[in-house]
């Protein structure tokens, strides 16, 4: 074990995270104890990665709030990058949830404090991006619980959410659908994660869970969690079910629009008499009706209504085809906005990407865009004033082009490819465009080009594992599992980027969708 790190003495090892080891250290100058988080070399390779890390650490270092773990210092000693941060004795929320030591009212209290910390950070323009129980430290002060959020912005720079197959499910289970689909989180994505934790604290299991990453991703993007029985709301308002429905809405516009508003609702729900969010009743709540006295409590539903997902992920076949071509899911949750919408889009900071409307799931709506012909000749330049650059395509236009690309994959993969390239020119961080492009190349038999697309995506911060959220891509993987068309080197390099278990052994593949390319 290390004895010193920079100017800090190391007292003991606190644990191991996805990014590296964490030590309890002491600053000899002032005797202050600190937690020293080291960052393993692969996570911070190259000058650019280090710069990004330093930038993010600086952004997190500006945060000073009782519900956030303070970052004291970012440094490097003997080639080891480290963060020195406030040491918070106590436990992390993950352990508390695992041991089921929290009463529902305590869970609400902790998460309200988490929202207080998030509200402050969001106002400063800093997103967390990886809210999950293991990033929340909880200390007991006599009767009172005190929560502090750690690791602001770190997930983005270190990619800790994507490293190691063992940690994938844990983190993905908290990611907001729009983050998975567009790679662009906004403050409401952090709040979605708080909703997931609340559900987990009340129910004892996560709302979107599964044996494989693909299952979890599918559920996050497409499925509503099972309603909770009244017994899960003991000691708090049963109307917390409304709160959960709002927090876990797939569409960020239907969620709490600010961490302050969510903190208030969480505190309100601590009162068993709370009547719920003001306004018209929601069409959907995440609490089951109270069981009439005398009748037997309904057993908690263990089986999810996920036939479609299981067909895709476990059995393949025509179900997968149908899934990949499903109409966009209809969302029925419509809850009143209790607070004036101060959407997160107003937050501006170098570390916060502008909020965008999430790309819709691949749908059958007819696009209003024109087809892009890849071979159309360029018009000859005209003399006169320099032509204006065409305006950048909007997110909505990009989504429509990609809908069209998805529809054309089987019959017109060449056209789909051109549409993806067109979108990527203006939106090089769009994961759906990369996923569709790889799939189109597969359909065209241009296998050797596939790894290059994954690499291009990675250069823009898109992780190949994000492609598992897209039906066409997973359908293509299943087909490849059966058909084995890819040359071994290409197959290996693609699957190496995806989590183990993406394709379950024994799962049946699709009926071929893509023509086997002719050999000439
Ligand atoms: N500031 C801190 N004060 C006290 N203990 C800490 C602090 N930071 C981390 N720890 C402890 O160190 C261990 C590793 O933490 P770390 O945050 O690296 O990993 P993790 O949260 O389990 O996973 P991940 O890296 O995916 O976030 C955990 O047991 C955590 O509770």
Image (cartoon, grey):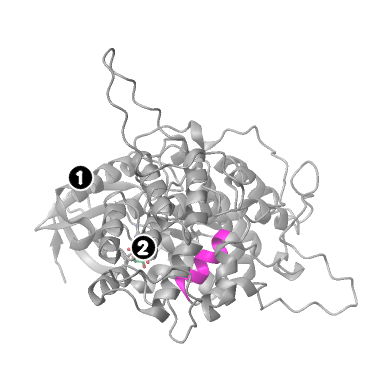
Q: Residue at x 28, y 68 (%)?
A: 520
| Percent x, y of residue 321 | 55, 69
Q: Which residue is mark 2?
A: 444
Judging from the image, what secondary structure is the residue with disc 2 in? Answer: helix
2 vs 1, front mark: 2
| Percent x, y of residue 206 | 57, 68
Q: Nearer the viewer, residue 194 or 401?
A: 401
Q: Residue furthest left?
A: 78
Q: Residue at x 20, y 45 (%)?
A: 51
Residue 402 lies, with reference to residue 257, above or below; the image says below
Q: Nearer the viewer, residue 307 or 300?
A: 307
Q: Quadrant of residue 22?
A: bottom left
Q: Quadrant of residue 483?
A: bottom left
Q: Which residue is mark 1?
A: 51
Which region shows up in magenta?
Answer: 212-221
Q: Main secondary structure of the magenta part?
A: helix
Q: Residue at x 25, y 77 (%)?
A: 488
First in residue order: circle 2 vs circle 1: 1
The quadrant in which the N terminus is found is bottom left
């Amino acid at each position: 074990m290390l004895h010193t790190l920079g100017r800090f003495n190391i007292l003991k090892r606190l644990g191991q995270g996805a990014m590296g080891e964490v030590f309890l250290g002491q600053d000899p100058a002032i005797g202050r104890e600190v937690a020293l988080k080291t960052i393993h070399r692969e996570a911070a390779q190259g000058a650019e990665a280090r710069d990004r890390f330093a930038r993010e650490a600086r952004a997190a270092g500006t945060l000073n709030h009782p519900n956030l773990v303070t970052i004291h210092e970012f440094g490097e000693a003997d080639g080891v990058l480290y963060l020195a941060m406030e040491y918070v004795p106590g436990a992390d929320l993950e352990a508390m949830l695992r041991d089921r030591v929290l009463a529902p009212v305590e869970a609400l209290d902790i998460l309200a404090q988490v929202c207080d910390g998030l509200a402050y950070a969001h106002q400063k323009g800093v997103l967390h991006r990886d809210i999950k129980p293991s990033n929340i430290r909880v200390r007991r002060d006599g009767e009172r619980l005190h929560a502090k959020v750690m690791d602001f912005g770190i997930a983005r720079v270190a990619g800790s959410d994507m490293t190691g197959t063992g940690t994938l499910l844990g983190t993905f289970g908290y990611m907001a659908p729009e983050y998975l689909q567009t790679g662009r989180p906004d403050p409401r994505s952090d709040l979605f994660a708080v909703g997931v934790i609340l559900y987990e604290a009340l129910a004892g299991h996560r709302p979107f869970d599964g044996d494989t990453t693909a299952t979890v991703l599918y559920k996050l993007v497409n499925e509503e969690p099972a309603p909770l029985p009244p017994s899960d709301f003991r000691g708090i308002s049963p109307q917390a079910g409304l709160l959960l429905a709002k927090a876990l809405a797939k569409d960020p516009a239907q969620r709490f629009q600010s961490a302050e508003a969510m903190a208030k609702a969480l505190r309100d729900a601590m009162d068993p008499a709370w009547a719920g969010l003001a306004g018209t009743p929601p069409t959907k709540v995440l609490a089951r009706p109270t069981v009439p006295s005398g009748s037997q409590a309904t057993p908690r539903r263990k089986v999810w209504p996920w036939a479609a997902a299981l067909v895709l992920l476990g059995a393949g076949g025509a179900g997968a085809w149908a899934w990949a071509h499903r109409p966009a899911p209809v969302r029925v949750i419509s809850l009143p906005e209790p607070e004036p919408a101060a959407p997160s889009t107003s937050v501006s900071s170098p570390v916060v990407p502008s909020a965008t409307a999430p790309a819709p799931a691949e749908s059958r709506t007819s696009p209003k865009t024109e087809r892009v012909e890849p071979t159309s000749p360029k018009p000859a330049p005209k003399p006169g004033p320099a032509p204006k650059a065409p305006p950048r395509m909007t997110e909505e236009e990009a989504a429509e082009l990609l809908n069209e690309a998805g529809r054309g994959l089987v019959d017109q993969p060449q056209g789909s490819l051109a549409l993806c390239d067109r979108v990527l020119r203006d939106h090089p961080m769009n994961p759906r465009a990369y996923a569709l492009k790889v799939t189109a190349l597969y359909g065209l038999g241009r296998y050797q080009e596939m790894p290059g697309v994954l690499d291009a995506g990675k250069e823009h911060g898109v992780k190949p594992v994000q492609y598992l959220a897209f039906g066409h891509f997973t359908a293509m993987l299943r087909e490849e599992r059966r058909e084995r068309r890819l040359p071994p080197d290409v197959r290996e390099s693609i699957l190496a980027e995806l989590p183990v278990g993406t394709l379950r052994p024994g799962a049946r593949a699709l009926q071929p969708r893509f023509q086997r390319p002719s050999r000439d």
